[in-house]
Amino acid sequence: MRIESVEFFYLSMPVVTTEADGSQDALLVRVRGGGFTGHGECEAAPLPSIAAFVCPMSHGVCRPVGASVLGRTLDGPADIARMAADVAYDSMDLLQAAHTWSGVEMALWDLLGQARGEPVWRLLGYSASNRRTPYASVLFGDTPQHTLERARAARGRGFRAAKFGWGPIGRGAAALDADHFVAAREGLGADGVLLVDVGQIFGEDVGRAAERLPALEAAGATWLEEPFAASAYEAYAALAARGSSVRTAGGEGAHDVAMARHLMDFGRVGFVQIDCGRIGGIGPARQVADLAAARGVTYVNHTFTTHLALSASLQPYAGHAPDAICEYPAEPKPLAVELTANRLERAADGSVAAPDAPGLGIEIDADAVRRYLLDVEIRVKGEVLYRTPAV
């Protein structure tokens, strides 16, 4: 079949704040071909992501992403890989290309799965979709008491594991952060799995990050996520060399396989977290999952938005060792909840797995798309390059 159309839908909450919550807006991708439809989601600012697909060519290796996709043949995974290679080369100088392509690539896998009547994980070569222990992904509260309440709420919803992120951590003294770690542990209980994400707050300052290690160790945290900038491999390695029981985690900022590999080989992370909406889609994420397994590094998905993105993020390591953990958006904005007509609900034992349904197994709620849709037009020299498509 041929790729007949690629359409983008810029969705947003009525009010967007500075809260570090990526579920406040979304860029939904719809791909059509051969009488089938696939959907994906870009995990990046929607407007520049759209622009990267339609922008005029600047020169030979700064072409729009759409030039490598529209009209192309899609009969198997190898065709997706060929398009990925063309995007990487022909859009080399278009920085947003990886993020734009990520959502398109997801949609292509979904489309291919729909056409073949197979789930994406089977197209990736897996014989089973293993169940994972989801961890509730929430933000730290403004105060330790607020963090305590969020931890208790997560446990009350049946999550044995929870990750607390961003908020005030790293913005003040280490002692203040320690109070939040204690509160999170108290709320989760002694047997809960506590994960901490500080959102690159320390830049490359190893000393400031290390100041938090004693409190994290005392709270029994499993990992310290993204203490440094995404490509600060030396800083990651230096913190890992401290020999703490709290391992480092990172990788959501990787927009290609090489960045993720460097984080493992040079940064010495214990957990590599990949976002299919940033790294180039499901195919590259599968490569990282295999590289991580060979290195004894634990692969974990990164997902904070919709269940479309959640399903895509579970596919790359669906057939890897069971009983591993996975990120599960626990408090997304209404946009992210309502966008999909179905969701990956947790089983009676609390576990979750990539669905058995064709493609990504997730249906889009057209009414929700209409509710949150922003009307956008991109025009250059009087020519309309993009106009919000009909739902």
Image (cartoon, rainbow, N blue to C red):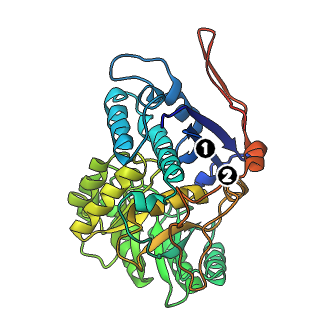
Mark 1 highlights which residue? 28
Where on the picture, by quarter, is residue 186? Answer: bottom right
Residue 303 coordinates in the image, percent (x, y): 52, 59
Vertical side of 306 occupied by 63: above or below: above
The answer to whether residue 382 is left or right of residue 372 is: left
Residue 66 coordinates in the image, percent (x, y): 47, 28
Q: Which residue type does callout 1 highlight? A: Leu
Q: Which residue lies furthest to the bottom in this view?
A: 190
Q: How far apart are marks 1 and 2 (CA)?
A: 9 Å
Quarter of the figure with the C terminus: top right
Mark 2 highlights which residue? 364
Residue positioned 62% across, 53% down in the render: 23
Q: Which of marks 1 and 2 is nearer the N terminus?
A: 1
Q: Which of 109 and 380 is in front in this view?
A: 109
Q: Which residue type does callout 2 highlight? A: Ile
Where on the picture, by quarter, is residue 145? Answer: bottom right
How many marks the image carries: the answer is 2
Q: What element carries label 2?
A: loop
Residue 34 coordinates in the image, percent (x, y): 54, 39
Tag 1 and tag 2, C-beta contact below 8 Å: yes
Residue 120, visible in the rendered structure = yes
Vertical side of 224 occupied by 377: above or below: above
Residue positioned 40% across, 33% down in the render: 95
Q: Residue furthest top?
A: 381
Q: How crowded is mark 2: few (under 14 residues within 10 Å), some or many (20 or more)?
A: some
